[in-house]
Image (tube, helix red, strand yellow):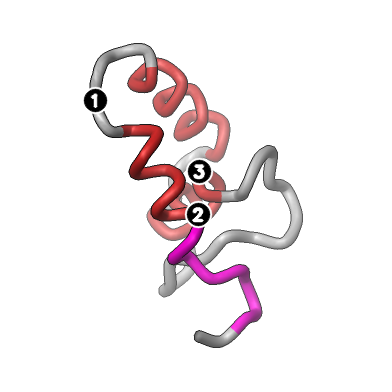
């Protein structure tokens, strides 16, 4: 578990958003990814939220 929300440099599948969220809260990366896929099947702004997080979450090791 890390103290900050950031996208990891390794172990990411698309942009690292799910991996960053999982690392931040100490959850399973696979579990967060599966949950995201299931939730993305329902109507809602999940894709928009993913793109927004992709743009605002810094890559691990970068300073903003």
Give the residue pinned by disc 1. Answer: 44
* Magenta part of the chain: 55-62
Picture quadrant where residue 60 is located: bottom right
First in sequence, mark 2 or 1: give its number: 1
Percent coordinates x, y for residue 14 in the rendering: 66, 40
> In front of the other: label 3 or label 2?
2
First in sequence, mark 3 or 2: give its number: 3
Q: Is residue 40 above or below residue 5?
A: above
Q: How many marks?
A: 3
Percent coordinates x, y for residue 13 in the rendering: 69, 38
Q: For this view, does 7 lie left or right of residue 1?
A: right
Residue 56 within the magenta-colored segment of the rendering:
yes
Q: Characterize the local packing of mark 3: few (<14), some (14-19) or many (20 or more) Cα atoms within 10 angstroms.
A: many
Mark 1 to mark 3 CA distance (whole Å): 17 Å
Give the residue pinned by disc 2. Answer: 54
Q: Is residue 41 above or below residue 19?
A: above
**Disc sitting over residue 10 in the figure:** none
First in sequence, mark 1 or 3: give its number: 3
Q: Characterize the local packing of mark 1: few (<14), some (14-19) or many (20 or more) Cα atoms within 10 angstroms.
A: few
Picture quadrant where residue 49 is located: top left
Determine whether the residue tagged by mark 1 lies in a helix, strand or loop. Answer: loop
Q: Are marks 1 and 3 in contact (CB under 8 Å)?
A: no
Percent coordinates x, y for residue 61 in the rendering: 65, 79
User: Which residue is at 55% across, 39% downward?
Assistant: 29
């Amino acid at each position: 578990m890390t103290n900050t929300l950031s996208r990891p440099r390794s172990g990411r599948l698309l942009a690292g958003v799910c991996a960053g969220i999982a690392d931040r809260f100490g959850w399973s990366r696979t579990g967060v990814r599966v949950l995201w896929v299931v939730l993305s099947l329902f109507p809602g702004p999940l894709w928009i939220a993913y793109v927004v997080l992709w743009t605002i979450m810094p890559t691990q090791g970068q300073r903003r």
